[in-house]
Amino acid sequence: MKFSFSSFPFKTQQVIAPLTVVIISLIAFILDSSLSESLVYQRSLVNQGELWRVFSGHFFHTNGFHFLLNGAAVIMLWALHGHFYTIKTYSFVFVVSAIICAVGIHWFSLDIDQYVGLSGVLHGLFIWGAIEDIKAKERTGYLLLFGILLKIAHEQFYGASEDVAALIGANVAINAHLWGAIGGIVAILMLKIRVTGPQSNRIN
């Protein structure tokens, strides 16, 4: 099989949303010292009413390696599933995954006082993309879905890679991956209800 850039999903609807995520994350990384104090998820400040942090905190990273890993993952998912992307659908799955990820951490992972990074949200997008593959009768969808579920289960039982933790300079928040994936599943169900409802309008 010949490699061709034309095989990648370069339509505006397929590119704008993931590109926006990378750009916002880059701005947050560059201006971290100015913005993080006001925008990063911190349990105590969320408890005091600063609820925007459950969303904005995902765009920040612990160091350059963390940013590059997450940025590369955004691009990888776009390469895998970008042909399914639209601005509205990608944004919807992203927002639902981000909020459920942070709320899950806030309510059930009481050992986490501060959280940054896109990895939780990316697990939600991965789940959604794999399901879209399956709906499109692409056999790789089953393999991808099994792989991401196996990864999450492995992390829950055995913990995260120590090498990754050393690279990003922080503990890997494995529960964020779990809650982000659950967020992706919730987003899928919400999209299905919207599509199959009596007066549904598909999110495009």
Image (cartoon, rainbow, N blue to C red):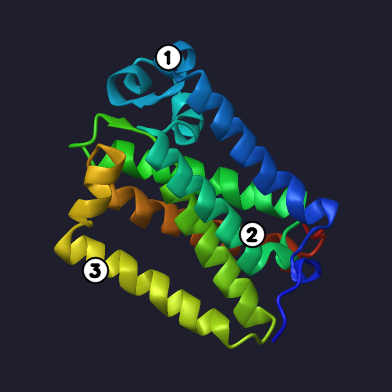
Residue where numbered disc 2 is placed: 78
Q: Which residue is mark 1?
A: 33
Find residue 25 and report its image quarter: top right
- Location of the N terminus by quadrant is bottom right
Q: Disc 3 vs disc 1: which is toward the camera?
A: 1
Q: Position of residue 129 (x, y in %)?
A: 59, 67
What's under tag 2, amino acid-wise?
Trp
Looking at this view, is 195 or 128 the one in front?
128
Q: Quadrant of the C terminus?
A: bottom right
Earlier along the polypeptide chain: callout 3 or callout 2? Answer: 2
**Vertical placement of residue 140 versus 81, above or below:** below
How packed mark 3 is, by other alpha carbons closer than 10 Å (few <14, some 14-19, many 20 or more), is few
The alpha-carbon separation of the residues under discs 3 and 2 comes to: 25 Å
* Residue 46, percent from left and from top: 37, 22
Please give the residue where the numbered disc 3 appears in the rendered image.
154
Q: Residues within 10 Å of mark 2 (few under 14, many from 20)?
A: many
Q: CA distance from mark 3 to mark 1?
A: 35 Å
Q: Mark 3 near mark 1, Cβ–Cβ under 8 Å?
A: no
Report the front residue among 177 and 202: 177
Residue at x 45%, y 14% (from the top left corner)? 38
Residue kind at label 3, given as amino acid type: His
At x 62% / y 68%, what residue is drawn? 80
Contact check, label 2 and label 1, Cβ < 8 Å: no
